[in-house]
Amino acid sequence: MRTIAKIALLGAGLALAVPAALAQDDAHEARETLMKEVAGKNAKLGNQLAKGEIPYNAPMASGAMKAISQVPDKLAKLLPEGTDSVSDPKSEASPKIWTDMAGFLAAADKLKITSAAAAVAAEQGQQQFAIAFGNVFKACKGCHDAYRVEKD
């Protein structure tokens, strides 16, 4: 009977551990997708529009910045413990996120504010958009420098 109880406890432990590991993988993949598809794609578009590499289009610029402004709120929900670069070799999330969550959330908020401002500036023309987009770039870089571990 004790053997059956031990097997049952072991099974229960595995049942709890497997979903947690899957949730961590899902969170990592969701963060990666969010950063590549939403932030990266729209940041690249914003950069091309700001530099005149493609013809300026105010609605396109504004839309790209609005998409970026939604990233911080989504990202904040995708940070369970154990998804940092130390715990997960695939992750680029610095452990500093969890030891300095207030700083990380402040950096995320800065991205939200600067990208929303750039969305408004987009309607004022390429020159105004380029200036505002520079602030978005600085917000991205500041967060990446502090809270991202670059993988090879």
Image (spheres, rainbow, N blue to C red):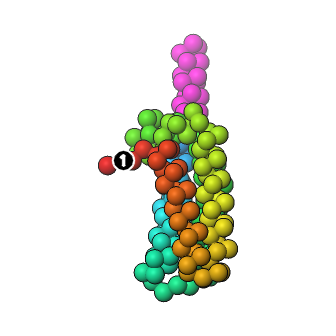
Label tally: 1
Q: Which residues, given as a range, are shown in magenta? A: 1-17
Residue at 59%, 76% (x, y): give it. Answer: 128
Identify whether 36 is placed above or below 108.
below
Residue at 59%, 69% (x, y): give it. Answer: 132
Q: Position of residue 141 (x, y in %)?
A: 48, 54
| Frontmost residue, 55 versus 148 | 55
Magenta stretch: dominant secondary structure: helix
Q: Quadrant of the N terminus?
A: top right
- In the image, residue 11 lies in the stretch drawn in magenta: yes
* Label 1 SS: loop
Q: Position of residue 6 (x, y in %)?
A: 55, 18
Left or right of 30? Residue 102 is: right
Left or right of 143? Residue 85 is: left
Identify whether 28 is placed above or below 84.
below
| Frontmost residue, 6 versus 85 | 85
Q: Position of residue 84 (x, y in %)?
A: 49, 39
Which residue is farthest bottom? 55
Identify whether 82 is placed above or below 104.
above
- In the image, residue 44 lies in the stretch drawn in magenta: no
| Frontmost residue, 79 versus 138 | 138
Residue at 65%, 40% (x, y): give it. Answer: 102
Identify whether 40 is placed above or below 143.
below
Q: Position of residue 100 (x, y in %)?
A: 59, 36
> Mark 1 — residue?
151
Residue at 66%, 67% (x, y): give it. Answer: 117
Question: Could one spot residue 99 in this view of the protein?
Answer: yes
Which residue is farthest top? 2
Question: Could one spot residue 21 in this view of the protein?
Answer: no
Tell me the kind of residue under disc 1: Lys
Q: Residues within 10 Å of mark 1 (few under 14, many from 20)?
A: few
